[in-house]
Amino acid sequence: MTITAAWSGYSAAKWGTESSLQLAKASATRTKANRAFQESLTLRAQDAANFNAWFAAYLTGNKRGERVAEKRFRPEYDVAFRAWLATKPFTNPSAPKGPQYMPQYKPAGAARAKLLDAQADAHYARGEDAAITADKYVRVTVVLASVLFIVGISSHFPLRSVRIGLVVVGAGLLIFGAVEILQLPGPPT
């Protein structure tokens, strides 16, 4: 019985540690996702500034300015720009508003941020589950400690019926604790 209570306490501690580790991984991964997203926004702003320079040159008929602006396009952006031009945006009223609205436009970092966010969510969910399991083990440990206490004090009562009653209560709590432990996953490795 004492060993079972100790094992339950050990399991609670292991699950508590697992929860902390998973929540820390979630936090670190979320930070990486935010960094990737911010990098994506920076590239998006750069793409927009370069496009605005091209568009201003286009509107003023400055062919040299258009070429200079196009040379500043990132290769990933240039693909979307060429696809946008193919829609004949200056004569086609249903053409997208600009290259950033094209399906070919995939700013670097956005997909990585989405993937990292999903990983962070998974770590967080595992951390929550581990915390719940740790709490369940703590409750079982308290029940088993109660059994030790009840059985321990039972011998101090002079009435035999009280001693037997306390032992029966202790046995019931022991069975309850054992059933609870059997339903819980073992400690993480």
Image: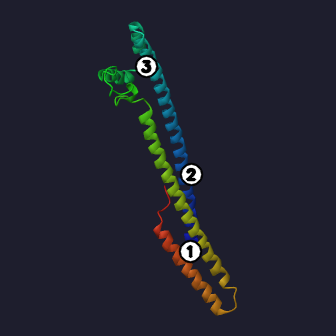
Numbered disc total: 3
Q: What's the residue at 52%, 46% (across, down)?
A: 26
Residue flagged by tag 2: what amino acid is it? Ser
Q: Secondary structure at mark 1?
A: loop
Q: Is residue 164 above or below residue 145?
A: below
Q: What's the residue at 43%, 40% (across, down)?
A: 115
Residue flagged by tag 3: what amino acid is it? Phe
Q: Is residue 7 above or below residue 27?
A: below
- The residue lying toward the viewer, choosing from 165 and 62, is 62
Q: Between marks 3 and 1, how big is the CA–CA gap?
A: 74 Å
Q: x, y (%) of residue 162?
A: 65, 89
- Which residue corresponds to mark 2? 20
Q: Earlier in the sequence, mark 2 or mark 3?
A: 2
Q: Earlier in the sequence, mark 3 or mark 1?
A: 1
Q: Between marks 2 and 1, how big is the CA–CA gap?
A: 29 Å
Give the colour scheme shown.
rainbow
Q: x, y (%) of residue 87?
A: 30, 24
- Which residue corresponds to mark 3? 51
> Mark 3 Cα within 10 Å, few/some/many (few <14, many 20+)?
many
Q: Which image quarter: residue 104? A: top left
- Which residue corresponds to mark 1? 1
Q: Secondary structure at mark 3?
A: helix
Q: Earlier in the sequence, mark 2 or mark 1?
A: 1
Q: Between marks 2 and 3, how big is the CA–CA gap?
A: 46 Å
